[in-house]
Every structure is written in structure tokens, then in C-alpha cells.
Image: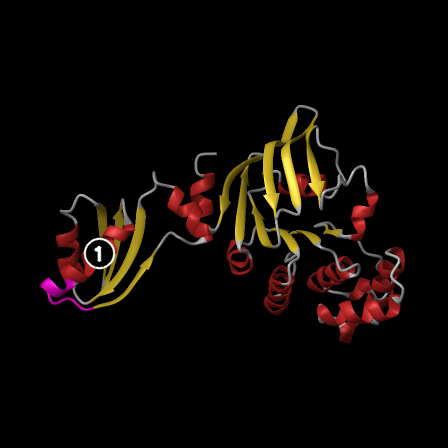
Amino acid sequence: MNTVEVNEVSKWFGPKVAVSEVSIGFGPGVTGLLGPNGAGKTTLMRVIAGLQVPSQGSVSVLGRDPRVDPSIYRSMTLVPEDEAIYEHLTGRQFIELSARLAGIADPKGRAREVLEIVELTDAADRALGGYSKGMRQRAKVASALVPDPEVLLLDEPLNGADPVQRAQLIRLFKELGAAGRTVIVSSHVLREVERMADRVIAMVDGRLAAVGSVATIRAAMTDKPRQVFVDCSNPRVLASELIGTSNVLGVQVNDELLMIEAADAREVAMQLPRLAVAHDISISRVEPADESLESVFRYLVEGR
């Protein structure tokens, strides 16, 4: 079931169209929201959060309109990309303030819990002004977790985090998604989105460009040849056998590595064992070269 529904939403600022006729649903789990700068990701998240009114269309979160029913904010939180902290407060004071504003019965106890979740307990009594960018991001996430939201919107939450902090946050987001929370993560760090998101939504120029898993999106790009790397003992012989087939569009040999460009990767996978046996070629590795999120995203934004 979708917990968030976006129906024919457009948002423009004067003559500039930031989001154009977007209809999409979000459910439990982690969804990665991707797009180049200016694609409309932040605007869409702010519209979902009720911070901006759609110029047309509607948004429903847990069956309610966030612009009409403010009680939704007990169940939905947003971690904005921009800084939104009080630098003179300690991390603990900041989280306790968030808990009091959320009406939590035991703000001190809840602050201890979420500080432990984001692994900030050791720095809890230091002023936020002395935190690194990554630590501030974790403090913002902790604040968002205070009401135990069903829907969590995260706009570039990995910005400024070091590799260890990124790994901690990715693990946390995956755990929240696995627990049934709806986690929507906007990010430009493609490899990390691929690690944490079950589903990807790509936006280009304010419109939806693709929706689904990385493999599903890539499979739908039938106009893009598939690229396959083959590590073998005699790549030149294998290349000469493959180049004459109708499925193979091109080959490239580099030492013992063969790169095949084909219309259908599955057909290549069926051809390789037969050719290897026929020509006494040892194959040690076969893997797709363009099924990563980075490759898929590059195809989506080509020619924009």
C-alpha cells in the first residue's frame, strides 16, 4: 500500500516550472529520488511535506492532505538539505527541544534513545556549533526520528558525512525501511543510493524519467545496447567468433578482457559457454558493464 500519493502535481515559480505533472506513489521501504541539479527533487519533497503548495494537483500522506491536516506531522518528518540547527545548543538539548515540541511525554528519555540510534551519544553534550557537517546531519536525522515517524523525507542526508558516517546513516535508513517505514531519500551520490534503496525514481527537468529497480529500468531501455565484460584466456578468438553474430554490435579487446556490446545480453550468455568449449577458452568472469545506477542515470540524462 502507498503511504504517500502524488497526483498530477506541478509546481511553478513565475515562468519557471520546477515540477511538471508528476504522479507517483511511495510505500514502505527506501526509495531513492535522483536527478541532476534543477531536476525538481527538493521542490517535490517540500510539496510532499506540505511546505509548498502545488500549483496544480494534490498530495496525500497517510490518507491526509498535509496542507489541510497538520496532525500529519506527528507521523511525517523532513530532514532538509539546508542547515536547520541552533548552534549554541548541545546535541542533547537540541534533541530534547525537538521532543518537547513534538509533545513526547519523556523528552530526555527519547533524546537518549535517538542519540544512540544515530551514534551521537559520545558528542551529545557538545555544542552543535562545534559539530562537523556529518555530525550535524546525524543530529538533524535524530531530531526527525523523535516522533517515530511513519514517513521520513531526507533531502541530501549524506552531504558532508565522512565514509564511516555515511555507512552508519545508510545502515540506519535501510533498517528503518525494513521496519516498515516509508523512507524517501534525495541524493546525488549514486553508488550510495544503490546500496540503500530498493526502488529508484529519477527526475529530469521536473518530470519523471524512470521508476523501478535499477535492473528493471535498465531492461526497459531497449534502445540502449547492453555491455558485457568477459575475462578469458583468449579474448581475440572469442571476439572474432562473436562479431559475426547478428546480436553482437561490437567488441573491444584489452589484454585478457573482452567488452561486448550486444542487443541482448541473455543471448550472449547463452553463446559464451558453447564458444568457450569449441575453442578451448577458459572464462573466469562475466559481468554486465552498464547495469549500475550510475550507468542507468547517465543514459537517462543524455541529451537533456
Percent across and percent down for residue 1 are 61, 48
Residue 147 appears left or right of 201: right
Given the current orientation, which residue lies at the most extreme top position?
A: 15
Q: In the image shown, does 118 or 199 lie closer to the viewer?
A: 199
- Any part of residue 86 in sight: yes
- Any part of residue 88 in sight: no
Percent across and percent down for residue 222 are 34, 40
Residue 177 appears left or right of 53: left
Q: In the image shown, does 72 or 22 lie closer to the viewer?
A: 72
- Mark 1 residue crowding within 10 angstroms, few (<14) / some (14–19) / many (20+): few
Q: Which amino acid, by three-letter code, is at mark 1?
A: Met
Residue at the image position 83 percent from the left and 63 percent from the top = 95
Given the current orientation, which residue lies at the most extreme left position?
A: 278
Percent across and percent down for residue 205 are 56, 34
Query: What residue range appears in magenta?
Result: 276-282
Picture layout, residue 112 above or below residue 228: below
Picture layout, residue 170 above or below residue 125: above
* Secondary structure type for disc 1: helix
Picture layout, residue 7 above or below residue 3: above
Q: In the image shown, does 128 or 205 lie closer to the viewer?
A: 205
- Residue holding disc 1: 270
- The verdict on residue 281 being magenta is yes
Residue at the image position 81 percent from the left and 71 percent from the top = 112
Q: How is the image coloured?
A: secondary structure
Residue at the image position 69 percent from the left and 33 percent from the top = 58
- The verdict on residue 20 being magenta is no
Residue at the image position 85 percent from the left and 71 percent from the top = 109
Percent across and percent down for residue 184 are 63, 51
